[in-house]
Image (cartoon, helix red, strand yellow):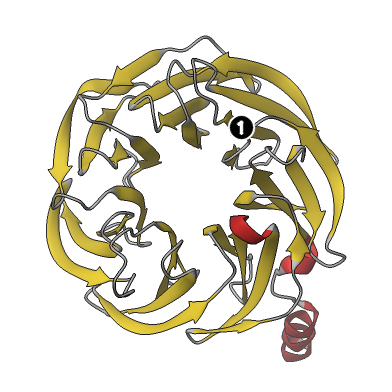
Amino acid sequence: MILINIALAMLSYQTPDSSTVNLLVGSYTRQGNPGIEIIDPQTRKMVHAVAQSQASFQALSKDQQYLFSVHEEIDGKGAISSYKQEKGTFSRLSTQLTQGDAPCYVLFRDASQTVYVANYMGGNLSVFQSQGGILQPISQNIIYPKPSKAHMAVIMPDGGQLVVTDLAADKIHVHALLANGLVATQYEDVELPKGTGPRHMVFNKSGDIAYVLGELSGTVDVFRIYANEFTHLQRIVIDQSVGNPNHASADLHLSPDGKWLLASNRKTQNSIRVLAVLPSGELRDHKEYVVGKMPRNFQFDPSGRFVYVACQGENRIQKFAFTNGELTDNQEDIEVKQPVALLFLKK
């Protein structure tokens, strides 16, 4: 009887996939589109929209009750807005200026209800506290020395540091993270070779390896982390275009099983490069796949069996099947004007 029950349970279990979620898309709004769109991946139709200008990046609370979205504006208009979800629709709660131009990344820390915003043209980190999703006036404005273009803020796996990639300075700023969510104003720097342009970074599940994408160098740098010290292990080229030095690599993600690292290239290659993760944490080049123009953010779906790619230059999101390092175009494009950022939202 026990064996029969186990077998029935195994048969009834279904790996979460695109059928269990909606796709939350953030986009630039120069073509009159709303900015934030909720799309059913099965029907490829929009089920809800939120009007927000230049909504180029979003973050969700763990319970997905609250949504935070940047307004990537300039001339002192850079801002962050918060929303509350009720049955798949979002209503605005608050908006605060980031005191920096072109905010391009937002991170939410559930433990302290803190919001961190990297301002690209402002070259600063904005820190906000929130209560019930409502943003309070800015708590900290960390301005980095010029030249600076803050691009991403991420909490290290041990939870004790917040790191900010600085594309113009070729540095990663490492701040101690305080219990209340604020950051130490004094920080350490991890330096990268001149011309790297660090844009995004991810950590492996064990937290001892970091991968840093260089937008301007078209590379991924691999670091081992021990006692919060970064030791460089490897640099691997992901944009192998010839004759065009204007690299514009954009995003990188580890597959859910940690066996593969994917990275996107814009302009020169318009591609996704797939790299195998070795036991040491270092990378081995596997294969490159041509995708639509200006691939920005991309995401694995919850099952890890599909990859969605936001192709800003072609007003579409491509869906690829992913199996053992191989990408196959499903020919199930989703039409969205100037898509930039993707998240998955539980139905």
Tell me: residue 339, above or below residue 295: above
As drawn, is 292 to the left or to the right of 186?
Answer: right
Q: Quarter of the image holding residue 86?
A: top right
Mark 1: few/some/many CA within 10 Å (<14, 14-19, 20+):
many
Tell me: residue 240, above or below residue 232: below
Q: Position of residue 347 (x, y in %)?
A: 80, 53
As drawn, is 170 to the left or to the right of 133?
Answer: left
Q: Can residue 321 be seen in the rendering of this structure?
A: yes
Q: Quarter of the image holding residue 88?
A: top right
Q: Quarter of the image holding residue 174?
A: top left
Q: Position of residue 281 (x, y in %)?
A: 25, 72
Residue at 49% x, 80% y is: 289
Residue at 66% x, 21% y is: 132
Instruction: Depth check: give the residue in front, 341 or 305.
Output: 341
Residue at 25% x, 25% y is: 144
Q: Can residue 259 be seen in the rendering of this structure?
A: no
Q: Position of residue 79 (x, y in %)?
A: 55, 21
Element marked by disc 1: strand
Q: Position of residue 164 (x, y in %)?
A: 31, 38
Residue position for label 1: 68
As drawn, is 91 to the left or to the right of 27?
Answer: right
Instruction: Depth check: give the residue in front, 328 or 293.
Output: 293
Tell me: residue 12, above or below residue 164: below
Instruction: Depth check: give the residue in front, 24 or 32.
Output: 32
Residue at 28% x, 64% y is: 220
Mark 1 is on which residue type? Phe
- Report the residue that reaches farthest toward the top: 137
